[in-house]
């Protein structure tokens, strides 16, 4: 889940977290496992991204074969 900042000068957001395990993408800190609103910091250098527990996010760069991908 991406929580975009849409207003100028905003440095924190209230984000609704649905019922599931959610984690901060950058730190891996657990956000919540109950449906609730949480306040997250939104510095200018990062976009707030929350990952649902058990989600698979491929982040490896592509390669022509498995030898080059390692």
Image (tube, rainbow, N blue to C red):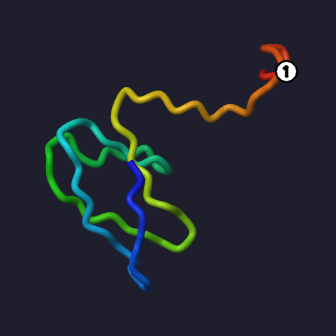
- Left or right? Give the position of 25 relative to 52: right
Q: Which quadrant would residue 53 be assigned to in this image? A: top left
- Residue 39 x/y as whole percent: 26, 65
**Where 36 sits versus 53, above or below?**
below
**Where 48 sits versus 7, above or below?**
above
- Left or right? Give the position of 24 relative to 47: left
- Residue 60 x/y as whole percent: 68, 31
Q: Which residue is mark 1?
A: 68
- Left or right? Give the position of 59 relative to 57: right
Dividing the image into 4 quarters, which one contains the C terminus? Answer: top right
Which residue occupies 78% across, 14% down? 66
**Count of numbered badges drawn on the protein:** 1
Which residue occupies 80% across, 25% down? 63
- Residue 30 x/y as whole percent: 32, 44
Which residue occupies 22% across, 55% down? 16
- Residue 21 x/y as whole percent: 27, 37
Which residue occupies 83% across, 14% down? 67
**How many residues crowd around disc 1 within 10 Å: few (fewer than 14), some, or many (20 or more)?**
few
Furthest residue to the top? 66
- Disc 1 element: helix
Furthest residue to the bottom? 9
Q: Which quadrant would residue 52 be assigned to in this image? A: top left
């Amino acid at each position: 889940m991406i929580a975009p900042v849409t207003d100028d000068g905003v440095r924190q957001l209230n984000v609704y977290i649905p019922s599931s395990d959610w984690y901060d993408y950058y730190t891996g800190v657990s956000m919540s496992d109950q449906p609730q609103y949480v306040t997250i910091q939104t510095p200018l250098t990062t976009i707030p991204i929350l990952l649902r527990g058990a989600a698979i996010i491929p982040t490896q760069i592509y390669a022509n074969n498995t030898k080059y991908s390692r």
